[in-house]
Amino acid sequence: MSRFSDAVRSRRTTIRATAGGRLVLDGAPPVRRGRIAALLSLPERLREVEAAVHENRRLQRRVAELTDVVAELLVPLADRDEEKVRELLQRYRDESFPP
């Protein structure tokens, strides 16, 4: 046998049930309830993080859109093109606040 398989064999543990119905690994350190609770809460935490990432992306996109609007407004204002400014503001209002 190889040293690896001997090492694996020597580390094997058995699982037994206690009177209270808990499973215990012989030869393994005890697992604290807090760690189990933390592991069980991971799927919910993952959903929360994914929702936060989605909201962050939505807000970043909105900031980019507003930055574009400001840039579009500043160029016509610098050129004193009032008609273009009114057109851009109306388009912004229509897109941002639909009826």
Image (tube, rainbow, N blue to C red):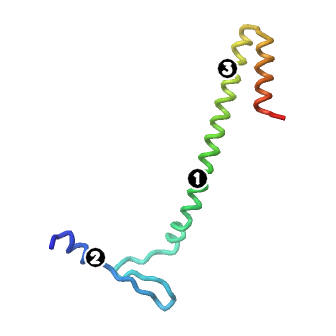
| Near-viewer residue (58 or 30) | 58
Q: Residue furthest front?
A: 99
Residue 91: percent from left, percent from top: 77, 24
Q: Give the Cα separation between the discs numbered 2 and 1.
A: 37 Å
Residue name at image x 76 percent, y 9 percent: 81
Quarter occupied by the N terminus: bottom left
Circle on res. 11: 2
Q: Give the Cα separation between the discs numbered 1 and 3.
A: 33 Å
- Mark 1 and mark 3 lie on one chain; the one further toward the N terminus is 1
Q: Secondary structure at mark 2?
A: helix
Check disc 1 and give the amino acid type: Val
Q: Residues within 10 Å of mark 3 (few under 14, many from 20)?
A: few
Q: Residues within 10 Å of mark 1 (few under 14, many from 20)?
A: few
- Mark 3 and mark 2 lie on one chain; the one further toward the N terminus is 2
Check disc 3 and give the amino acid type: Ala
Q: Secondary structure at mark 3?
A: helix
Mark 1, residue position: 49
Mark 3, residue position: 71
Q: Residues within 10 Å of mark 2 (few under 14, many from 20)?
A: few
Q: Quadrant of residue 89?
A: top right
Q: Mark 1–mark 3 contact, CB under 8 Å?
A: no
